[in-house]
Image (cartoon, grey):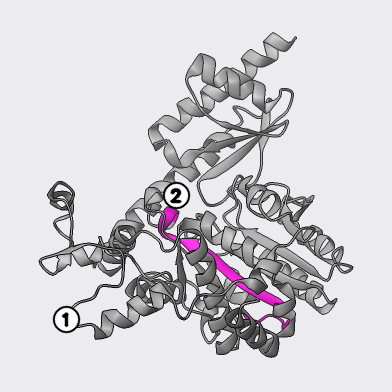
Amino acid sequence: MNPLAQQLNATIERENPHIYAMLSSLGKAIYFPKVGILSQSAEAKSKAKKFNATIGIATEGGQPMHLKVIQDTLSAYNPKDIYEYAPPAGKPELRAAWREKMIKENPSLTGKSFGNPVVTNALTHGLSIVADLFADAGDALVIPNKNWENYELTFGIRRGAEIVEYPLYNEEERFNSAGLREALLAQKSKGKAIVVLNFPNNPTGYTPNAKEGEEIVAAIRDAAEAGVNVVVVTDDAYFGLFFEDSLQESLFGKLADLHERVLAIKVDGATKEEYVWGFRVGFITFASASESLLAALEQKTLGIIRATISSCSHPSQTFVLHALQSPEFEAQKAEKFNIMKGRANRVKELLDSGRYGDVWGYYPFNSGYFMCLKLKDVTAETVRQRLLDEYGIGTIALGETDLRVAFSCIEEPYLEELYDSIYKAVQDVTVTSK
């Protein structure tokens, strides 16, 4: 094993042996080269005042070389902020701005010790870093039975983790914290579990309330006290889109100093929060009381980034930073939030009108982009196909009964037509099947 990896491992094991035990074989082997092209280039950038012949970009007139046809569309930005490689950890100013935003929007982080967010190529990349660092074949990934299908690819197919599901809702149609606790305690023989908490949930659009949040934290604490090392990831892809009386912040703050056997990781990003899906700007943040441990985990994260994508898009980071620093940012974001909230409220109004109850129910939702219908007498895939072929409407079939509808991309005046059309499609399929 490389001496740098050994040094990082020794630091992590010294600061918290439970977190060292959570690392995968790759997580233990990975490191960020201290002496290599990037480190030598960084040193040259600060000292080579005459000629800097270290890194693979081209320059012209003291600026990064560029094509006029591209720069003409980006003339508001200095070429150095879009054409050069960004550092592997991300643009420092952006990392600082995002950390400040996290603290402002998550009061429970006050007084907590957590690292500087590292820039990722959006949230999937952040989750894949978690999988690489902590998931080995046979490790348990504990997720609810209503989940984003990419978890299976990222943790299961790529890293060989065993998917352990529990029902998302309990009999009262609230978050099933008892199911989470049971699934975690079932891992006592393994001594380790990876938990992903995705709120607002994809596909159901559900976020727990404050009491349910306390129950989730208690379930994770119970598992830790029972001897299970828990890697708990808050997948905060749709953070901030809370439309009703639910948690208004990430559980990351409550989990940050929960127990010595709990490693809290926040994966979030500008992707959905700032409506810049194609920019692919995300972040991964670790919590620990030990600065040395945080530094070691960051170095291992940079090793994964260096070994896979080298660094994330510099222009996208510059664009997001510009938005965060704009005095108009908060007002513009509030305007879009109100539009999204109006759509969610209109959907709930339609569903509670009594017009559709004979053919479907729906899972509780209060946030995010989505909601899920629970069809009663027909299969979701049959309805999905009917909607496509006869009505020109796209939806997502999940399992036998669940139909996911992204109200986020349907303007409010058209929502009634959308749900009326889904209702007609269900009726069509029902008649055909008789």
Viewer-nearest of labels 1 and 2?
1
Q: Amino acid at mark 1?
A: Lys
Q: Say whether residue 209 is visible.
A: no
- For residue 104, which quarter of the picture? bottom left
Residue of label 1: 50
Quadrant of the image for the N terminus? bottom right
Residue of label 2: 341
What range of the chain is rendered magenta? 256-272
Q: Position of residue 238 (x, y in %)?
A: 50, 55
Q: Nearer the viewer, residue 359 or 190?
A: 190
Q: Nearer the viewer, residue 146 or 162?
A: 162
Q: Position of residue 84 (x, y in %)?
A: 27, 64
User: Helix, strand, or loop for circle 1?
Assistant: loop
314 vs 111, left or right, is left
Q: Residue at x 89, y 68 (%)?
A: 189
- Relative to 137, is 356 above or below? above
